Amino acid sequence: MKKVFQKHSLRRAFSLIELVFVIVIIAIISTLMLQRTDSNSLQLATSQVISHLRYTKHLAMVNNKFDAYSSDWMQTRWQLKFFQTVESDNQWAYAVYDDSYGVHSGNPNETEIARDPLTNLLISGGYQPISYGDERLYNKANLGNSYNISNISFGCGQKIGFDYMGRPLQGDFSDDTTSYDSGILLSSRCEITISDDTESKTICIEPETGYIHQCD
C-alpha cells in the first residue's frame, strides 16, 4: 500500500508542476502579445506599404505599357501614389493604379486601380472618384485611419513607378513626353519615412534593381 501511495503522490506532484509551468508560459506570451499590440501598428503599416510597392513593381514587369502606336504610353505606367485624403481629415493614404484610361490626369479613377491579390479589393485609401469607407476599397491603404500614421516624408516624391524591367521611377508620369524623361529613373536610394506620434520606420528603394526593403 505504501508504494502505491508514493507513486500516486509523485504523479500528482508532477501534474501540478506541469500546470504551474504552463501558466507561467501563458503569462509570458500574453505579456509579449500585449506589448506587440500596443507598438506594432507602425510596423504593420510599413510592411503593408512594402508589400504593395513590390506588387506595383510586379504589375509593371508583367504588364509592359509600351505601345508603338501611342505617343503617350509612358504616362500610363503602374505606380503607387501617396496622398492625403480630403474626405477623411487629411489622413495619409495611397493607391496603386496605371492611369491608362481616358485622359492621363495623374490621378486614379475606378477602372485604373489595382486589386489587392489577397482580398480582391481596390488598393486605395480613398481618392477620387471613390471615397474612403467604400466597401469596394482596401481601406487599410488609408494609413492614418488604419494605423495612426501621422506623417510620411519622401526622398523621391509621392509617386513611385516602375518600368518593364522593374527599375524604379519617380515624378509625375502624366507629364512625360519620352520613354525616360530626364530625372525619371532613380539614380540613388529613395527613402520613404513613415511616422506615428512616437517613432518612425524607413522604407528604401534601391536604384536600378528596384529592391524594396525596410532599412531603419
Image: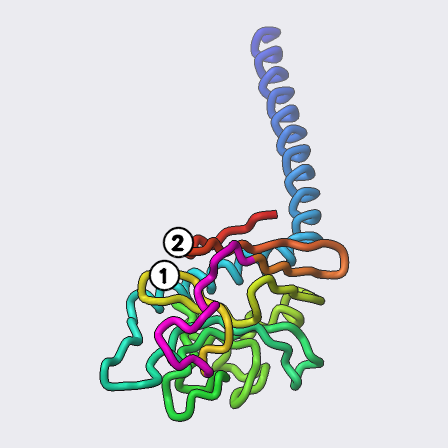
Task: State yes or no: residue 176 in magenta.
Answer: yes
Q: Is residue 14 left or right of residue 114?
A: right
Residue 83 image-quadrant placement:
bottom right
Image coordinates for residue 29, horizontal then vertical, percent: 64, 40
The residue under the point 50% across, 51% down is 213
Q: Residue at x 44, y 64 (%)?
A: 185
* Residue at point 72%, 54% (across, down): 199
- In what element is the residue under mark 2? loop
Q: Nearer the viewer, residue 87 or 161?
A: 161
Residue displayed at 48% across by 71% down: 80
- Which picture quadrant has residue 71? bottom left
Dots 2, 1 in contact, CB < 8 A: yes
Which residue was labeled with disc 1? 166
Q: Which residue is mark 2?
A: 209
Amino acid bearing label 1: Gly
Q: Earlier in the sequence, mark 2 or mark 1?
A: 1
Q: Quadrant of residue 142?
A: bottom right
Return the residue nearer the eye: 158 or 2: 158
From the viewer's perspective, is 83 left or right of 35?
left
The amino acid beneath tag 2 is: Thr
Spatial CA distance of label 2 from label 1 is: 7 Å
Relative side of 34 to 155, left or right: right
Callout 1 secondary element = loop
- Find residue 201 and report its horizontal and vertical position in percent: 63, 54
Q: Which mark is residue 175?
A: none
Q: Main secondary structure of the magenta part?
A: loop
Q: How is the image coloured?
A: rainbow
Q: Which residue occupies the extreme left position in the image?
A: 68
Looking at the rendering, the stretch of residues picked out in magenta corresponds to 175-190
Report if residue 201 lies within the magenta region: no
